[in-house]
Amino acid sequence: MLDTNALDTAALRLFDEVARSGSFTAAAELLGYTQSAVSRRVAALERAAGGPLFERLARGVRLTPAGVALHRHAVAVLDRLDRAGEELAAIHGGRGGTLRVGAFATANVDLVPGTLKRFAGRHPRVELRLIEGLSARLMDRLRAGAIDVAVISDYPAGLPAEGSRAGSEGARAVPLLEDRLLVALPAGHRLAGEPEVDLRDLAGENWIEAAPRGQPTLLVTACAAAGFTPRSGLRVAEWSGKFGFVAAGLGVTLVPELAARAVPGDLVLRPLRGMAPVRKVYAALPEIPLPAARELVEMLGQWEVCTTVSPT
């Protein structure tokens, strides 16, 4: 039976070189050993293998049938180890491996896909995987090691402060941008021609919302500061559904600037005058991030908001 304890990497490489060169002397010169050291290592391998691996010839050596069998496996093992080393070097250098990116829905309209396109162009050997979810859920997955970087916002969950550690696992949040909320109006709305809209002028409007009634939202907070409570009879979770209700003239809704590109052309987007609702967007990293994750976060920080505000 083969004693695998004797088959360390150095022993396998020596065995491979002797098999390839057919000479203890040539292998010794190539690997920097003395010939006697090579002879001793080969003898130890043969004891571990339970019999001779080489035939000793007048000039050099050649593999026995047992040696041929072991050499086939040794080549496969050494090849896998070399490939593992290359893959690890690529991961540690940010040039390869898999990068798992989590992001909340509206970040996937422009911010994340635009940045991932640039990243993929720079690092084509890094496999990118995307997980979409709510910010709080993404933080849980980051702490559990299920994703490598998370694009999150401070709404609606209480998320980490800028640069702080998030939880005992030491995740930290890197600030990216402030995402202001715009108001989406039907094209025929009385305020559609205004360059900006005062929130107080929308006090009598019906608001298309996603959150259950009574749950604190940026809209509720902003309207309270403006001196009124928003009327929100229609609850629609999906953005595409909200846009359909607004286009039908059944109400108005808030749209994050990050999602402005997704707004249909038959709606009008207007900034809110004064104290407009704003949420902060972060990239969260584990305590020991992958180099590729760090570079992606740097690229996310270079992204500029491109708002598609409808013409007057």
Image (cartoon, helix red, strand yellow):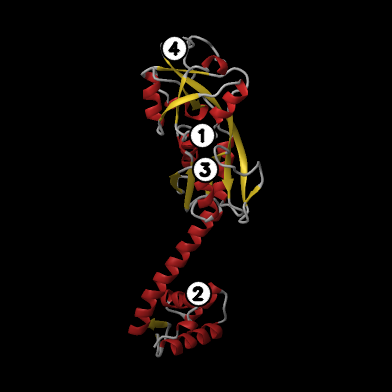
Q: Position of residue 246 (x, y in %)?
A: 40, 21
Q: Is residue 158 above or below residue 204?
A: below
For the residues marked 1 and 3, what is the alpha-carbon distance in whole angstroms?
21 Å
For the residues marked 3 and 2, what is the alpha-carbon distance in whole angstroms?
45 Å
Mark 1: few/some/many CA within 10 Å (<14, 14-19, 20+)? few
Task: State which tag comes first along the sequence, 3 or 2.
Answer: 2
Q: Who's the residue at 49% across and 77% down the image?
A: 14
For the residues marked 3 and 4, what is the alpha-carbon distance in whole angstroms?
33 Å
Q: Is residue 298 above or below residue 52?
A: above
**Circle 1 sits on which residue?**
214
Q: Nearer the viewer, mark 4 or mark 2?
A: 4
Q: Position of residue 164 (x, y in %)?
A: 66, 46
For the residues marked 1 and 2, what is the alpha-carbon distance in whole angstroms?
65 Å
- Disc ID at residue 135: 3
**Circle 2 sits on which residue?**
9
Q: Who's the residue at 38% across and 23% down the image?
A: 245
Q: Secondary structure at mark 4?
A: loop
Mark 2: few/some/many CA within 10 Å (<14, 14-19, 20+)? few
Q: What is the three-letter code of the residue carrying label 3?
A: Ser
In which quadrant is the N terminus drawn? Answer: bottom left
**Circle 4 sits on which residue?**
189
Q: Nearer the viewer, mark 1 or mark 2?
A: 1
Q: What is the three-letter code of the residue carrying label 4?
A: His
Residue 64 in view, yes or no: no
Q: Secondary structure at mark 1?
A: loop
Q: What is the three-letter code of the residue carrying label 1?
A: Gly
Task: State which tag comes first along the sequence, 1 or 4.
Answer: 4
Task: State which tag comes first along the sequence, 4 or 2.
Answer: 2
